[in-house]
Amino acid sequence: MPDVGYTAAFVKLHSIGKKEEDPLSDIRDPKELLASSVARLFSADPAKYTQIIGENLEQANQEALLQLCNAYNCKIV
């Protein structure tokens, strides 16, 4: 009697017609999402997030973040 059960061939055939849903499909511009999210955090508690970024990001990265936020008209302190 032949073996019946799970085989790699079955998995491959089973997944051929399956379309995976992209959970991030509504994000059109990830950079804009980042800039607006950072700006939203800053507006909630500017002093706190200024300190966090100052302590955890190198100066070059702080400048890049500021440029990114400015490019999308998302103001941070």
Image (tube, rainbow, N blue to C red):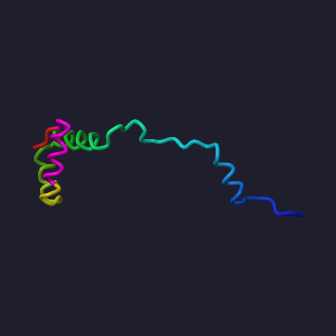
Q: Is residue 10 left or right of residue 74?
A: right
Displayed quadrant of residue 44: top left
Residue for point 17% across, 56% down: 61
Which residue lies most toward the right here? 1
Residue 50: x and y in percent read 12, 50
Q: Is residue 12 left or right of residue 19?
A: right
Residue for point 73% across, 59% down: 6
Residue for point 10% across, 47% down: 47
Magenta residues, start to end:
62-74
Q: Is residue 74 above or below residue 6?
A: above
Locate the N terminus and report the quarter of the image it occupies: bottom right
Locate the C terminus and report the quarter of the image it occupies: top left
Residue 19: x and y in percent read 57, 42
Q: Is residue 34 left or right of residue 20?
A: left
Q: Is residue 53 above or below residue 28?
A: below
Q: Is residue 69 above or below residue 64?
A: above
Q: How many numbered circles are shown?
A: 0
Residue 49: x and y in percent read 16, 49
Residue for point 86% across, 63% down: 2
Displayed quadrant of residue 74: top left
Q: Is residue 55 magenta?
A: no
Residue 72: x and y in percent read 20, 37
Q: Is residue 13 left or right of residue 48?
A: right
Displayed quadrant of residue 70: top left
- Dominant SS of magenta comes to helix
